[in-house]
Amino acid sequence: MDQFIQQHAIITEIPVAWGEMDALNHVNNVVYFRYFETARIDFFSQINMMADLKETAVGPVLSETHARYKRPVTFPDTLLVSVNISDVKEDRFIMHYRIFSKAQQAVTTSGTANVVMFNFKTGQKAKLTPELLAALEQHKVAE
């Protein structure tokens, strides 16, 4: 776990809820996308993207998401969800997620999201600001 924490600058801790399990007694597949969302919003808040969204009406939208399930997760557990960035362009980037189970002491799930910047006033794609580009670059991993 310490190695996982040291490898990632931004980690979101999420407790597994009993109601997230399905009839097969493990966390339902769709719930992982909520975990990704929680980590994504936490990441965006920490790099001030959410504050920029309020001021400019320009913010992130998902164009594609993906999950790879490696190990089932069950209640009780606490998950650490990391976020890294790659493929930064002027109007888009890719987010990489890894979910680490404290109970299993292992990575259970990985995923990606293609994120495109969008101007909610005009309904058009938008460019990342220089400040957001710099913040994303700080969390960039090798492609």
Image (tube, rainbow, N blue to C red):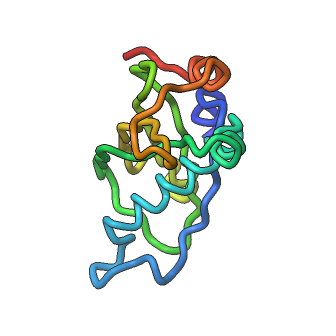
* Residue 48 image-quadrant placement: top right
What x and y, as percent, mark residue 64? Answer: 29, 44
Q: How many marks?
A: 0
- Residue at 54% in and 26% down: 128
- Residue at 71% in and 40% down: 46
* Residue 38 image-quadrant placement: bottom right
- Residue at 58% in and 20% down: 133
What x and y, as percent, mark residue 109? Answer: 38, 49
What x and y, as percent, mark residue 25? Answer: 34, 79
What x and y, as percent, mark residue 17? Answer: 54, 76
The answer to whether residue 68 is left or right of residue 4 is: left
Between 123 and 12, the one lying in front of the other is: 123
* Residue 57 image-quadrant placement: top right
Considering only vertical position in the picture, is 131 above or below 54?
Answer: above
Between 17 and 42, the one lying in front of the other is: 42
Looking at this view, name the residue that lies furthest to the front. Answer: 122
Position of the C terminus, as image quadrant, is: top left
Between 112 and 116, the one lying in front of the other is: 116
- Residue at 40% in and 67% down: 31
